[in-house]
Amino acid sequence: MALPRRIEMRLPPVPPRPKAAVRLGFGLAGLGLAPFYWLLAHRWQTPGLRFHLDSAILGLRVLASVPRPLPASLIFRLFVFPMDATRYFEIEFMWRALRKALPAVRYLDVSSPRLLPLLLLRHRQVQAADLLNPDAADLADTEIVVRAAGLSDRCRLHHCRLEDSAFAPASYDTITSLSVIEHVPDGRAFFERLWALLRPGGRLLLSVPCAAQAVEQYVDRSPYGLLTPDERGFFFWQRLYDSELLQAHFYAVAGHPRRLAIHGERRAGFFEASTLRKRTDHFYPLWCEPDLMGREFAVFTSLADLPGEGVIALEFVKQ
């Protein structure tokens, strides 16, 4: 198998935050415009729109349940920006798969966006959940929503990495991990650990970025503070999987998936450009995401057909 092509990137500096009054005005504009762009996205049949609506309903419950003011950024994300870019496709894939199945008795989510496991709990698709996340700040926000949604008795939060967890083998009926494995240097070992935690008959759902040819991206500073630099002073960021890498990391361990779906950008470079703008432009119109993703992304039947970057979602069943 050929080694993935290496790309080294220097992350742009983040500009200073605007003044609080400016941020407030921007947030209020987003609250007003988000419903319009959500409706507009229906013309493209963008996946994930029902999930977007469910997150807003959860946001209303959170606001009504918490006696003290919530962080403004958390409110904004619940109502305006619950999903980022390809999350619309990834979450829709997992949501459909899990809503059609019998409720899972034991469920593990590894660092997916918090709304996926929490809404699965709210809809009674899982009876008890373990949520693992090594990002302390993100986990703290998750804890706020868990308490406000009345899910504390069925949801346990774990601040650790998967390799440091104490979960017993064959413990879970369902495991999800959305766009996480690509950020782990040894992706196969990470997948083997997930597979070992699954019971016979259980399901593992995951998603990773993909391309016609595999790529490994390195950046000049540690995105999460978890990794050490290599001999060139760069930190591993993520890999884009091609067919050979999917075979080596996943299929060789678990066999071919029961189901998969591929979404990708229609124009090569669009996703990278929009991601860069989000990192550097505090006034990126986040409320446009549902319409933008439906317009700029499409379904593909093969990785070889991708003109640029995409995302592949996979469902494995353990025999």
Image (cartoon, rainbow, N blue to C red):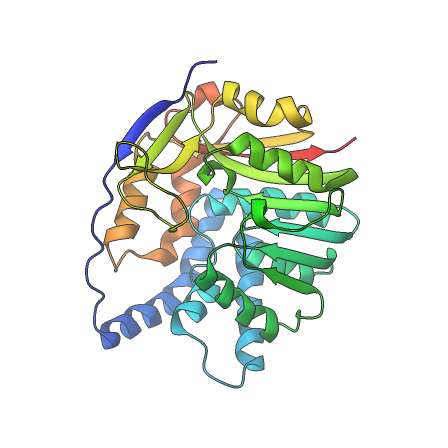
Q: Nearer the viewer, residue 296 or 173?
A: 173
Position of the C terminus by quadrant: top right
Q: Residue at x 57, y 21 (%)?
A: 247
Q: At 25% from the left edge and 75% from the top edge, which residue is drawn?
A: 20
Furthest toward the front, the residue is: 231
- Tell me the residue at 37%/64% (across/down): 33
The answer to whether residue 46 is seen in the rendering is no
| Residue 214: % across, % down | 42, 23
Residue lying farthest top? Answer: 1
Is residue 6 shown left or right of residue 192? left
> Vertically, is 263 above or below 292?
above
Q: Residue furthest bottom?
A: 67
**Left or right: where 137 falls relative to 6:** right
Query: Where does residue 32 sit, x and y in percent of width and height?
Result: 38, 69
Q: Picture coordinates of residue 164 (x, y %)?
A: 57, 49
The foreground one among 163 and 257 is 163
Horizontal relation, residue 132 to residue 274: left or right: right
Work out whether residue 66 can be spotted: yes
Q: Residue at x 66, y 73 (%)?
A: 150
- Foreground pick, 185 / 122: 185
Foreground pick, 316 / 283 = 316
Q: Relative to residue 238, is residue 111 drawn left or right?
A: right
Q: Is the residue 273 above or below the residue 19 in the image?
A: above
The mark total stands at 0
- Across and down, in percent, residue 143 comes to 55, 68
